Image (cartoon, grey):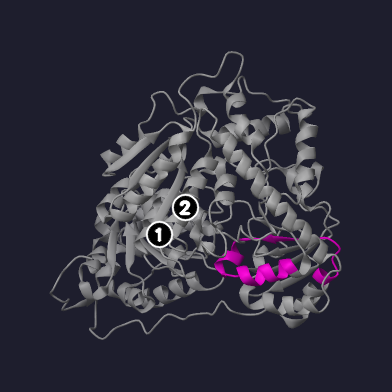
Amino acid sequence: MTEKTDEPKKRWTRDYVFDVLKELGIHYIFGVPGTNEIPIIDGTSYVENEVHYVECLHENIAIGAAMGSARMTGKPGVLVVHVTPGIAHSIGNLFNACRSQMPLVILCCQQQNELVTQEPLLASNLVDLAKQYTKWAHEVRTPAEIPLVLQRAFKEAMAPPNGPVFISIPWEFTMVRIKDDAHIKGITKISPHFTGDPADIEQAANLLAAAKNPIIIAGDAVGYADAWPELQELAQLLGAPVSLQQFSSVTNFPNNDIHWQGELPGAQDQIQNVFKHHDVAFLVGFGAQAQLAVFKYSNGPLIPNHVKQVYLTNNTWDIGKNAYGESAVFGDIKATLPLINQIVSKNPPKQAEARNKHLAVLAEQRKLQWKQYKATALDQDEIWAVLIADALREAIEEKGLQKKFVYVHEAVSDGAAFQMMLPLGTKSSSPISYYCVAGGSLGWSMPASLGIKLEQNAIQGIETKLVVNAVGDGSSLFYPQTYWTAAHEGLGILYIITNNQEYHTLQLGLQQVIAAYGKAPGYEWEPKTTDPEYLRINRPKFDFVSLAKAFGGENGEKVEKPADVRDAVFRGVDYVLNNKSSYILDMRMAQNTPPPKGKTIVDVWYKQYALQPALDFFHKAEQQHTLKATANTEEIALPANIPSLF
């Protein structure tokens, strides 16, 4: 925080912002400086405001960093952006914040009010730009309105379900003199801890208790509510497998629980296979319900019609959004689940105990197969993600960093390995120990790492002593300017670049498109090549360590051999724990040499996915059947663990 001994002798309308931040205990404003924003930024120069301005080099970095801060504190992340380009540059992560229901307050300094109608430089209808992805978007009409608008903005961002709010302020409005005793009275706080209607709770509980083969799908509202224990109790009572929404923003169920089956797959038939033998699905906090790229109505709904759907969440929009719900409970998950559990416990399903025993056996089988898969990975020429994830697990456990780490995920092609191997269970972590977004707009993770690391003590009982960001090479190139802010703020963050020298997820997506439309009547579309040059990032090749150094990232190394992964990860962890600067590990996930004669790049990288064990062992037989059936048609199928969205 900038040192300054003199206190302001006057108050301006901009000081209402600092009144709010002081009341809520918010200590950071993120942004890219612009002339219009200077009156607000200047307010961070006064020590008594207790707010530090975090300078970023792109607005989508600023909003991403604010999102990371918000996730750690549970309070709104605050950023200030510059007119039309400022909010336009922020749209990618604003979309992510909207889909992940993250509390943000975006202050955008519009051109002068008396000038806007004349279409001056940079001015436009800012509210229209932002409103699609916000809970509320508004342009201040008079300086006298600022206290009212700020109170509503912060109230709404924090009210359940959380979400971003956008406020456009003609910049001269921020400099209007106000009385020395003019302050915002406070911010209305709406408690998120409300229970559902008793009749609805009883109906839901009775449907679950009567289920012959129930399944639980846990979405982000579970993790945000810190409701692991309550959902674990229900899973045990029902003997139900627990799958997670794909691209979960947080860890919505602990991976050391026998009921955990990882995230839902990313293909229509594979999602249907998860549900087809179940009679009741408990959709709890399940917001992102269609995280896939290819869907055909002719192939049926994602959740088959015979499955009774029971909902519990704090957002009415997510209840019955895409299908009829037999039962709908609108309430806070942590407050309401104990009431459901109490009723279910009086008459649990008869087969629950047998299913729990079966799930315990499957969990041990999964551990063994992933252990064997790791051993196979050590014998390969290129690096597989399982080695990186397991090395991180070892470092966290050996260095006593349980509940003192946050893993930030954007290694999109390799999510299963990190979700399986990292200590994301009850003894080592909390839901927010894992950071991702439901929106999928690339470039979310590196910016978020800044805000996460700044907040040393987070909610849910965790610390941010170790912040690790695993990010694909393509995603890392969206905002490499992040390295500058990390250096400028003295933040020790471990960046692991999973460098496969291509847009790997798009390669996976291409195979899914071919499988869906290559032989489909009326389409029969095939690309000229399944290994197109335009999906490569290798001519010229990037030196990610040198790139980081150019922005102030002081140290790092290139890792090329599987046997070197563990030591490199330990060096990186040690470095960021003992230095206030970042460390970059350029993990070579693919070799520089071309594929062997007669083989394509698809043949080379498909091996690691074909051999990769499932996360979902409960529905493993159904998924294997899909792969076998697809293989008979000589089409390439994506394993259920692999998302394909981009």
Where residue 467 sits in the image (x, y, percent)? 40, 55
Question: Which contiguous range is marked in magenta?
Answer: 207-236
Where residue 384 sits in the image (x, y, percent)? 53, 36
2 and 1 marks in contact (CB < 8 Å): yes
Q: Can residue 632 be found in the magenta stretch?
A: no
Which residue is label 2 attached to? 408
Q: Which image quadrant for residue 497?
A: top left
Asked if 169 appears above or below 503 in the picture, the reply is below
Instruction: Name the residue type under label 1.
Output: Ile
Instruction: Name the residue type under label 2.
Output: Val
Q: Is residue 287 rendered to the left or right of residue 50? A: right
Could you tell me which secondary element the residue under label 2 belongs to? strand
Query: How many residues crowd mark 2 within 10 Å: few (<14), some (14–19), many (20+)?
Result: many
Q: Is residue 368 visible?
A: yes
Of callouts 2 and 1, which one flags the residue occurring earlier in the amino acid sequence? 2
Q: Can residue 211 be found in the magenta stretch?
A: yes
Where residue 511 sits in the image (x, y, percent)? 65, 31
Q: What is the distance, in whole Å, between disc 2 and disc 1 at their CAs?
A: 9 Å
Could you tell me which secondary element the residue under label 1 belongs to? helix
Q: Which image quadrant for residue 340?
A: bottom right
Which residue is label 1 attached to? 452
Q: Is residue 149 rendered to the left or right of residue 271? A: left
